[in-house]
Amino acid sequence: CFCPFVQRVWVALELLGEPYQVLDPYAKPADLLEVSPKGLVPALRFAGDDKKSLHESTVILEYLEDVAVLKQKPLALPDKGDPYTRAQARLLGDHVNRTLVPAFYRFLQAQDAEAQISGGKEFNDAIATLVEKLEKAPPSATGLWNQSATDLGWADIMAGPWLYRATVVLKHYRGWPVPGEDTKTGAWIRRIVEHPIFARTTSTEDLYLESYERYAFNQPNTSQVANAINSGKGLP
């Protein structure tokens, strides 16, 4: 899976265990634009009812979580009987969206040495702050950060796609020092990446290096995300 936003939803669908079909939207066909007006993925269209659709990865994750509650199937948030802990898990995801994700792209797209140093610090700070929040959150809200847990949690799904790409793409193009497995952060990343369900949604390292080369050299019109980073705007 190339797109980290899509990978979030793919992992959740695998966890839910409901049937689904993956379509390649690279050419932005008309039916994708009907579901996602900006042509962004992921987008979800419901079988048997073309009028029902969703887009935006976090919104789709929330929907799948609600479906899991109705079907009494485990997914990513803590038990529905503990709304406070569920809210704490969502706050972890909010931090990922607001800081970790944009910092990843700013670091990768930075071209001169000064900007790359600044971008690397911002990205590392975003991870450090996330770690602080994980340490303070109730253990059942922290997914695989909790060393006794075996199931992917909300924070794992929200952050995992970018943490994994950091170990491949940022390491290759920006010399990012991957946290060692003897550190709690490094062990957490490894547990996410090696989880069987997460691993089923990843591709080869060569594919990621090829796919993110345009970002690394900040080539024009790489994506709407890249354009937003270059213009200083929020992510689309």
Image: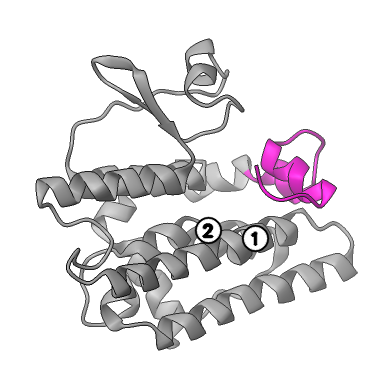
Q: Quadrant of residue 124?
A: bottom right
Vertical relation: 22 (above or below) 148: above
Vertical relation: 29 (above or below) 16: above
Quarter containing the N terminus: top left
The answer to whether mark 2 and mark 1 are in CB contact below 8 A is: yes
Name the residue beneath numbered marker 1.
104
Q: Is residue 7 visible?
A: no
Within the magenta stretch, is there residue 71? no
Residue at image location 57% in from the left, 80% down from the top: 129
Please state which of residues 27 and 39 is positioned toward the viewer in this rendering: 39
Say which mark, if any, is on residue 162: 2
CA neighbours of label 2 inside 10 A, class few (<14), some (14 to 19), many (20+): many
Please state which of residues 74 and 69 is positioned toward the viewer in this rendering: 69
Quarter containing the C terminus: top right
Image spot of residue 84 (x, y percent):
31, 74
Image spot of residue 83 (x, y percent):
27, 69
Residue at image location 19% in from the left, 67% down from the top: 79
Gap between marks 2 and 1, in whole Å?
7 Å
Q: Earlier in the sequence, mark 2 or mark 1?
A: 1
Q: Quadrant of residue 86?
A: bottom left
Please state which of residues 177 and 71 is positioned toward the viewer in this rendering: 71
* Secondary structure of the residue carrying numbered label 2: helix
Q: In the drawing, does residue 233 fall left or right of residue 112?
A: left
* Secondary structure of the residue carrying numbered label 1: helix
Image spot of residue 198 (x, y percent):
32, 54
Within the magenta stretch, is there residue 217? yes
Q: In the drawing, does residue 191 fall left or right of residue 207?
A: left
Give, as a single range, the part of the protein colored magenta. Answer: 212-236
